[in-house]
Amino acid sequence: MSKDVTHVAVLGSTGSIGRNTLEVMAASEGRLRAVSLAAYGNTALLLQQACSVRPRRIAVVDPTAAQRQDWSLLPPAIELSVGPESVLRLAADPEVDVVVCAIVGSAGLRSTWAALEAGKTVALANKESLVVAGPLITDLARRKKTNILPVDSEHSAIFQALQAGRREEVVRVLLTASGGPFRTFSLQQLTEVTVAEALAHPTWSMGPKITIDSATLMNKALEIVEARWLFDLRPEQICVVIHPQSIVHSMVEYRDGSVIAQLGPPDMKLPIQYALTWPERRPGPAAKLDWSQVMEFRFEPPDYERFPALKLGQEVAAAGGTAGAVLNGANEAAVAAFLEGRLAFHQIVPLCQAVVQRHHFESCPSLEQVIEADRWAREEVLHWTMQ
């Protein structure tokens, strides 16, 4: 196998990040090759991807979905495996150089862990891995002497801007947020938000769970926790700034007053490619800014009363321990309840806050304990929303 080719496992290949990853790889002139693909249950698209990309292996997490699919068109040279354990095997495959962890939610934690345990470079799009088990994940990466490269646009921007100075010179990082579709809504208007309105993001095209998180600004709360562990920052060093244009993806402020920003159109292909090709920068398919056109950048402080998720994220980042796992589990369950009509939009964050406050806190949990805390939080939300 050529050393000039980076061999990639794409876990979550049928989601938004996974599809963009395959576009980046297709434009790489053979330097990036998908040797394995994994999906949860979208087997029809996975089959199409397999026929097009011709990986060596594919995996389906959901056995029921795999059983329903007609696999007769799958090329015989491609190995198919089924079940949660099959994804872990792909993550640890000796032929793989980089694992793109793009499985949505806490389900991606075990695959991230398996990839790091095997010493793989991880291109991390699954922020929940760090939210749920940040200290454990980063400690594992250090022990295995491997890298976690962020795929989230905000954390990729911070990662790039941090290269402009020494870590001890950093005053704070500024996570930018579009503000979502309800940036100008009153408290009363937020009580009347429908599912269709919440799924209509003004600048980004994402899956439903992440889109709802962007509307509540819970995505920013989770990103605060993620940044805390990924970049070894103190919680008070992480700030959020509303930037509706979504062109400045985040910034780093240094002690001399310099603020270094990373800019680009709202296109996930750029941070994906940077994670796959780091430390090199190569031509790619991401959209480019058109500097011949007039552009206006607006920045404003967030409204913590209308969007209490931000304060909750700061509290959870400061607490550490099992708080992140409980917040993540509660939020995933609350978003599902909202999408199913069992919970109002404005109740999502208060319910998450209540579950975080009620849980039995462990300051130095094991991996099993954070997974259990996540499970407990989901059950709590389910109990509250099914009454």
Image: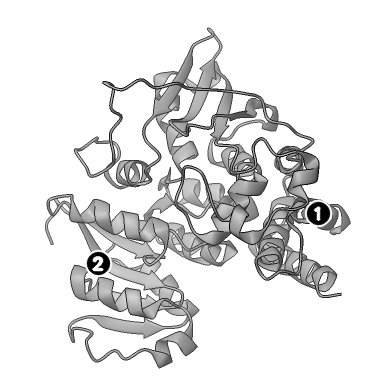
> What percent of the width, then of the height, locates residue 313?
71, 42
* Dots 1, 2 in contact, CB < 8 A: no
From this viewpoint, is residue 98 visible?
A: no
If the image is split into quadrants, where does the N terminus sit? bottom left
**Which element type, helix, strand or loop, lies under badge 1?**
helix
The three-letter amino acid code for the residue at tag 2 is Val
Report the residue at 54% width, 47% height from top.
138
Who is closer to the viewer here, 228 or 202? 202
Determine the image quadrant of residue 257: top right
Badge count: 2
The three-letter amino acid code for the residue at tag 1 is Val
How packed mark 1 is, by other alpha carbons closer than 10 Å (few <14, some 14-19, many 20 or more), is many
> What percent of the width, then of the height, locates residue 306?
76, 38
Using residue 10 as the reference point, say whether residue 179 is left or right of it.
right
Q: Which residue is mark 1?
A: 356
Return the mark for residue 35: 2
Q: Give the CA separation, mark 1 to mark 2.
A: 40 Å
Who is closer to the viewer here, 242 or 17? 242
User: Going by the picture, which residue comes out furthest to the top?
Assistant: 256
